[in-house]
């Protein structure tokens, strides 16, 4: 299971490198990666509110790894910022 997370993390890094650092993956690019990104955002919210037992597959270490690459935890905010609607 750990290897699957790392594999998707690497896929996200490749996507972000090709897309100006954006972590908003459209389904047209990859449905699987899009779902994975949504799951990471959801599981972080669970980690913050319920704790590790409620956030299956998410840990603070993984949150840190995603933070290191500039992952946007709020996809809607990132979309507006990249489109020039927010600073």
Image (tube, helix red, strand yellow):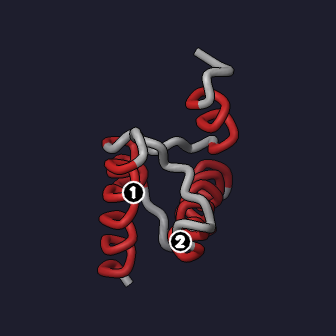
Which residue is the site of mark 1?
15
Q: Is residue 73 left or right of residue 12?
A: right
Query: Where is residue 16 shown, x and y percent of the image?
Result: 39, 50
Q: Secondary structure at mark 2?
A: loop
72 is higher (above) or lower (below) than 77? below
Whether tag 1 and tag 2 are in contact, CB under 8 A, the answer is yes
Q: Earlier in the sequence, mark 1 or mark 2?
A: 1
Quarter of the figure with the C terminus? top right
Which residue is the site of mark 2?
30
Label 2 Cα crowd, 10 Å radius (few <14 / some 14-19 / many 20+): few
Q: Is residue 23 left or right of residue 17?
A: right
**Distance from the alpha carbon under mark 1 to that under mark 2:** 10 Å
> In the displayed image of the protein, which residue is found farthest to the top?
87
Residue in view at x 32 percent, y 58 percent: 14
The quarter of the picture where residue 67 lies is top left
The quarter of the picture where residue 7 lies is bottom left
Task: Please give the label number shown on residue 61.
Answer: none
């Amino acid at each position: 299971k750990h290897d699957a997370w790392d594999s998707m993390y690497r896929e996200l890094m490749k996507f972000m490198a090709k897309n100006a650092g954006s972590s908003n993956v459209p389904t047209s690019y990859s449905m699987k990666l899009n779902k994975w990104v949504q799951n990471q955002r959801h599981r972080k919210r669970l980690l913050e509110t319920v704790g590790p037992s409620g956030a299956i597959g998410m840990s603070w270490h993984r949150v840190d790894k995603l933070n290191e690459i500039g992952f946007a935890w709020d996809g809607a905010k990132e979309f507006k910022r990249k489109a020039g609607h927010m600073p």
